[in-house]
Image (tube, rainbow, N blue to C red):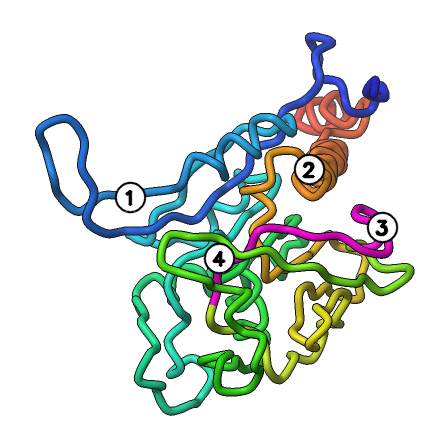
Amino acid sequence: MASSGSEMGESGSEHRPRIGITTYYQEGSWGVWSSVASIVPGSYVEGVAAAGGTPLLLPPVGTDPSVLELMDGLIVIGGVDVDPQFYGAERHELTSSQPSRDDHDIALTRAALEHGVPLFGICRGAQILNVALGGTLIQHLPDVTSTAKQYQPAPGQYGEVEFTTVPGSRCAALLGEQADSPCHHHQALDEVAEGLVVTARAADGTIEAVETTGENWVLGVQFHPEENRKDARLFEGFVAAARRFAHTRDAESRPVHGADHDREDALLP
């Protein structure tokens, strides 16, 4: 699809919005080396790039939410469980967390919400979104539903979830009435935070997507769209929103025609 003039840079090429992506921070290896590293699965960065964005990694070290002033969108990626201390619950024996990463992701999420930066939460990212706004989580889905095996069939193996979207929602606009996606999780949203609405559910009632009710582009999905290379609609919709956000912000910060000359004239004796 051709870009409108409002989405074109000064050079005439389509603007590539800058997309911040949160990261893991754990043991990694490269060449002959093995050490703690900031890691992002390639499917996330490739998904952003293929949709027309420029991926920028935001590791959970030296957290500075003001960095979002330089970003046009934020993706909070999947990973380990959110620590239950952040939503006032006792730890389940199967909960595995990294509280320092939770602090980082929650801070960036709240900053994105505050400043209207388009926000896409994926799996853990949807849970972070809910917790950041005061919601809670189910710490182990097999405790509450007999169909939980489909969501995490085995270590290192994605399941497949089918879900139905809510008419009129952002999720429905991008995916239609029904869709499916790879998934891998043993936790899920429980009490939905104020300010969020559920916009997709699996057949067993598991929440698969939440959105905010305002105009800002905010979407959290429990599944893993980055692993579905044949369906880029969510990444494309998010990057398009980031591009619009960048254009609007740039237009608002651009000096009014003649304003600079007026200021210079005012300084003359």
The C terminus - image quarter? top right
Lower sequence index among marks 3 and 1: 1
Q: Could you tell me the amino acid type at mark 4?
A: Leu
Report how far apart the C-alphas of labels 3 and 2 lie in the structure.
Answer: 12 Å
- Residue of label 2: 231
Mark 2 falls on what kind of element?
A: loop
Question: Magenta span covers which residues?
Answer: 172-185
Q: Mark 2 or 1, which is nearer the eye?
A: 2
Lower sequence index among marks 3 and 2: 3
Answer with the quarter of the image where residue 195 lies. Answer: bottom right
Mark 3 falls on what kind of element?
A: loop
Report how far apart the C-alphas of labels 3 and 1 lie in the structure.
Answer: 35 Å
Numbered badge on residue 38: 1
Q: Residue at x 43, y 49 (%)?
A: 22
- Residue of label 4: 108
Q: Could you tell me the amino acid type at mark 1?
A: Ser
Q: Could you tell me the amino acid type at mark 2?
A: Asp
Farthest-out residue, left: 32
- Residue of label 3: 176
Q: Residue at x 65, y 79 (%)?
A: 192
Farthest-out residue, right: 168
Q: Evaluate whether residue 253 shows in this view.
A: no
Pinpoint residue 244: horizontal percent, then vertical percent.
Answer: 76, 36
Report how far apart the C-alphas of labels 3 and 4 lie in the structure.
Answer: 30 Å
Q: Mark 3 or 4, which is nearer the eye?
A: 3
Q: Could you tell me the amino acid type at mark 3?
A: Gly
Q: Which residue is drawn at 74% across and 71% down?
A: 198
Lower sequence index among marks 3 and 4: 4
Answer with the quarter of the image where residue 188 lies. Answer: bottom right
Front-most of residues 252 and 93: 93
The N terminus - image quarter? top right
